[in-house]
Image (cartoon, rainbow, N blue to C red):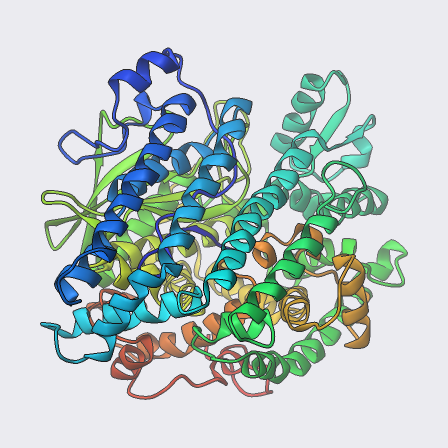
Amino acid sequence: MTRLATALGPLVLALAMPGAAQADAVSAAQQSETTDLAKWEGEWHLPPIDRSTPSALAEQIPEAVAEYRRELAAIADNPAPPSFVNTIAPLDRAGRRLRRLMSVLRIHLTTHGTEEWRKVGPDLVAKNDEALAEALSDPALFARVRAVYRDLPQGTEDAEQARLTELTHAAMSRAGAGLAAEDRARLAEIDAELARLRTQIAQNLGREAAVQFTFFDNSARLDGLPQPLMDAAAVLAAKQGREGQFAIPNQRPQVFAVQTHVRDRETRRVVWQRWMDRGATPGEFDNRPVAARILELRKAKARLLGYPTYADQVLSSRMVGTPERAQAILDANWDAVMAADARRVEELTALARADGIATIEAWDRIHYLDRLTRERFGIDPQEVAAHFPLPAVRDAFFAAAGDAYGYSFERLSGVPTISPDIEVYLARRDGKPAGIVYLDIRPRPEKPQGSWAAQYRPAGDLAPGELPVIALHSSPPPSAEGEEILLPFEYANVLFHEFGHVLHMLASTASYNGTAALTVPWDFVEVPSLLNERWLLTDRTLDRLPHHLTGAVMSPAMRENLRAARQYERVFSVNPEFMALALVDLKLHRAAGEIADVNAFEQEQLSERGFPASANPTMRASAAVHIWSREYAANVYTYLWSDILAADLAEVFLRAPQGFHDRGVGEDYFETVLSRANRVPIEQTYREFHGRAPDEAALIRRFGLDGGAATE
């Protein structure tokens, strides 16, 4: 899944995601005296990563918060009648210094970790969040915004200004700016506490993972694990004082490698159970009481804002509109997905019987699905990975963006970064500079796990001479020392996915923060990235990914087998693991009563729904960061809805002469949908590109879940 560090809404600045980072060796006091970290200099005006320290940001961010509040006060106190020029536009610009500083902080927090950054990060994030909440709920500002809004379409020069006015008014209404003073004060308290608790959820998981290892003293317990991963496990055990043993950290790449390759069922079970128990062990890292408090606060917030549930509040600004419709979309796909999975489990069970296993458990699924796809489709994951060396995959997603949209990417040198393995590129479109892209796509011990995209300077927040600044972060499995990383297919796919987010941000032609790419309804945000995955398995892309040793291109048979296996496995949103997570998320945020243990509630809901015992949710509720994030709470269904939209859009490309690489269709999609960001309602841009509203059967059609021919 994607984790996006971004800005939401016209007045909401870029938020720091919890994490950790590295301290600069230079004296913090000296740096704070000599370096203004909001001043981005050099040819491309890039973040001064090499000069930033925790203490400098701890001093400068509160100052920037105060400056932001002064800017807001000046707008609110303006004696002139409210207008777009003196109210809406300056509101959108306000806080640029704070946004720059928070971007610097976020870069550190999400790329490299030390205790020093962990100490200062949460408090600075909370100060930022508090200022944003105040801005959105300020009654004096809202009175001026409402006056401009009520005068529409008068007072604006173009459609984007009118759109920004509408979005600003809607965001402030949802934030409670129209409430009485007592209710606004209570809402501010709730939001401040929620910000701290969201940070705590993620920090608990990160700190827990840092100290959780499963040790094995016999290499036979890990039989089947590729030798580079076996060697890495031995090195890690030695670092933990267990020389001669093997350590599997409780982190996704290593856990899933064990599930895929290790033959010993007990090993798979132990490693899997630890993975699924994240955030649910009594003690300092237990997320269950934190989650319970978050749910309590979200209910209170919804009631203050006049909504029956938090799900109603959140979905009022999404494409689907209501929790009832979101539930209906889940229900419409649930039976088809579970029926298809039951057939699959029968096949997995038949394969497992040869190993003496009569019933498939959750820790068997990945292993036997991998074996089935290898045996049925002739897929050797290591042979496939030999075609996906990390630099070649990077060049391939660059090239695909060139085919479809006219982009090229030029490596820059001398740009300060957290680590020397981070690459920085100047993106050009049809030869013209379009943005700066940071690629942080190599694993580091101190780097948080996962993959995500972030915008450090969005298109709507540019000073003269500046370009958008965007980053792609990922932590693929490490290679043996001195060897290039060969990506398993799923990690190559993740990079194409995240690069879709990069392209969405890069393409934006918005003139304002409030109409930028990631202010589109949140259940559309994933669509460009899900669509971008489709370029990976095209013949043109695979031709660009020869075997890293022999130089031979992937054979036609391997290509067809890989596509057939992909078709069989399906995207994760039409598998039971995701359906469970999405269902639980909606149920949690629609429930009327108190929920003390989110994992117990989850189990009750899944049992009532007849969820198969052979599967687990993608993440249990105590570890499901999406459920507790601001962006995905009450709308994890987004991935299913977005997959439906992406499948629907893909059909337009599939009809083109050059398929996904067709420049004509690519140009149309770029100009009509991608580049317009939120300048125009996404429902309108979608209709203009496709010629109709979304077809909710597109995903079922893509995978033939209704018994028809698949459109993959």
Q: Residue at x 73, y 57 (%)?
A: 368
Above/below status of 692 relative to 36: below
Q: Is residue 665 left or right of residue 271?
A: left
- Viewer-nearest residue: 246 or 596: 596
**Quadrant of the image occupied by residue 532:** bottom left
Q: Is residue 678 visible?
A: no
Q: Residue at x 46, y 79 (%)?
A: 711
- Viewer-nearest residue: 133 or 80: 80
Q: Position of residue 593 (x, y in %)?
A: 75, 70
- Viewer-nearest residue: 473 or 155: 155
Q: Is residue 104 visible?
A: yes
Q: Position of residue 596 (x, y in %)?
A: 78, 58
Tally of marks? 0
**Quadrant of the image occupied by residue 249:** top right
Above/below status of 642 relative to 332: above
Q: Position of residue 650 (x, y in %)?
A: 37, 74
Q: Is residue 272 left or right of residue 440?
A: right
Q: Position of residue 529 (x, y in %)?
A: 40, 61
**Quadrant of the image occupied by residue 160:** bottom left
- Viewer-nearest residue: 372 or 31: 31
Q: Residue at x 70, y 47 (%)?
A: 287
Q: Is residue 345 left or right of residue 665?
A: right
